[in-house]
Image (cartoon, rainbow, N blue to C red):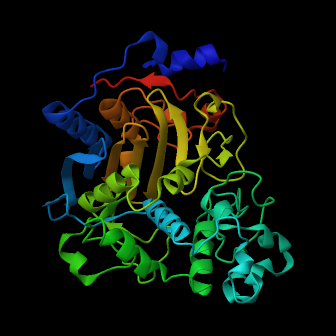
Amino acid sequence: MRFGIWLTVMGLFVCLCAHAADRPLRGDALDRRIQALMGVAHVPGLGMALIENGRVTYLKAYGERDVEHHLPLRTDTVMYAASLTKAAFAYSVMMMVDEGRIDLDRPIGKYLPKPLPQYSLYADLADEPRWQLLTPRILLSHRSGFPNFRYFPPGKDYDPHGKLHNYFEPGTRYSYSGEGINLLQFTIEQGQLADVSDYMRAHLFERFDMPHTSLTWRDDFASNVAQGYDKAGKPLGHDQHSHAHVAGSMDTTLHDYAQLAAAMVRGDGLKPATHAMWLKPEIRIRSVQQFPPIVLPDTSDNDGIALSYALGVGTFKSPRGPAWFKEGHDDGTSNLLLCIERTRDCLLMLSNSANAESIFPYLIQATFGDVCYPWYWDGYIPYDRPAWRSDEARKQPHPPCLRLDFHM
């Protein structure tokens, strides 16, 4: 299928340069758009926050946190942050950099009391000396060479006996890895640089008014917690994490994470130079999609927006200037934080449904206008375009600045 035919199939996509950007929706108009999209895409609950010039200006929850009992989702409902945990952790690491606890370019082996493979969790690396090349900077920017998790080897199904392995030389390319982020936590704690849970609580959660946020489950969350739902609407409950894993164990609320997002886009708690370092692109991203990691072919689709990864967040060049983002995903969770650096504007969405990602492109368009978000690379296939999930669709160009128009 040629590019011209593909555009015809896309139908409702129109070139950005041929259309003036819609005026972003606010107030009742935004409420109606959100509720309409939730209805047609079968999304039980969604919370949205908008941050303008570094201040939270819109905070609202829609739908239900518990469908069976018809309990409403609220802005203080405890929700699973999933990989939004990684952005919070990365920000706290930059605070450690300012304190002189961490040198981002020092090999992790120099922080550890003994060689990494001598710890049982990392014994698989005994015959892989490339672990000695790993640094905090490499781990935060997803250049470790590890798979996302060892139990999901590249191109294979879940393997409960999966071994940890470096699939490429650390530092040479991007490939999303929760293993790499958890290894940095392990290094910090084994090297006695900080207890990560205590540090994040004191430096982020308490400092930025996040009373219902924790890396581990708290019993007081139980009375107001969101149940997760898969794509078929099946309830999945809510995992109660007993151990802190910075790759994704955080529970939070729309209110709490919006406060953190506002602080992060303002640069609170960091020296200006450190905040700039946090958002500086470290590696260009070439893969056609983010998942599955390592195995997908490269593309030039996102060259025009310079899609890259910085220290814990993705970056790209939007028509409004440099932008950064972080997603959170699980079987019953869909989250996204998107920020425009210069204007200090952010969009935060938290949902208890796997279906919410299918309306994220429309909601980005509705709230921010045309920002060239790399929706296809992120796997945010619109609910009404299921054919775009096919292997054949993956072979076609997907320019991020093509505009998606919503019609009911």
Q: Is residue 94 left or right of residue 41?
A: right
Q: Is residue 38 left or right of residue 180?
A: left
Residue 241 % position (x, y): 40, 78
Label count reads: 0
- Residue at image position (64%, 58%) is 142
Q: Residue furthest top?
A: 18
Q: For residue 163, which quarter of the picture?
A: bottom right
* Spot occupied by residue 304 in the image (x, y as percentages of width and height): 61, 27
* Left or right placement of residue 291 versus residue 360 in this view: right
Q: Position of residue 25 (x, y in %)?
A: 24, 30
Residue occupying the point 30% across, 23% down: 407
Instruction: Please indicate, yes or no, whether residue 49 appears anywhere in the rendered image.
Output: no
Q: Is residue 5 above or below residue 244?
A: above
The answer, for residue 151, to whether it is visible in the render is yes
- Give the camera-side residue of 140 and 151: 140
Residue 325 in picture, x, y percent from top left: 47, 47
Q: Quadrant of the C terminus?
A: top left
Which quadrant does the N terminus fall into? top right
Dividing the picture into quadrants, the one containing residue 368 is: top left
Which residue is at the front of the view, 63 or 378?
Answer: 378
Q: Is residue 13 above or below residue 176?
A: above
Query: Quick check: 201 left or right of 125?
Result: left
Image height of 306 relative to 210, above or below: above
Identify the residue at horizontal 21%, vertical 80% (top origin).
220
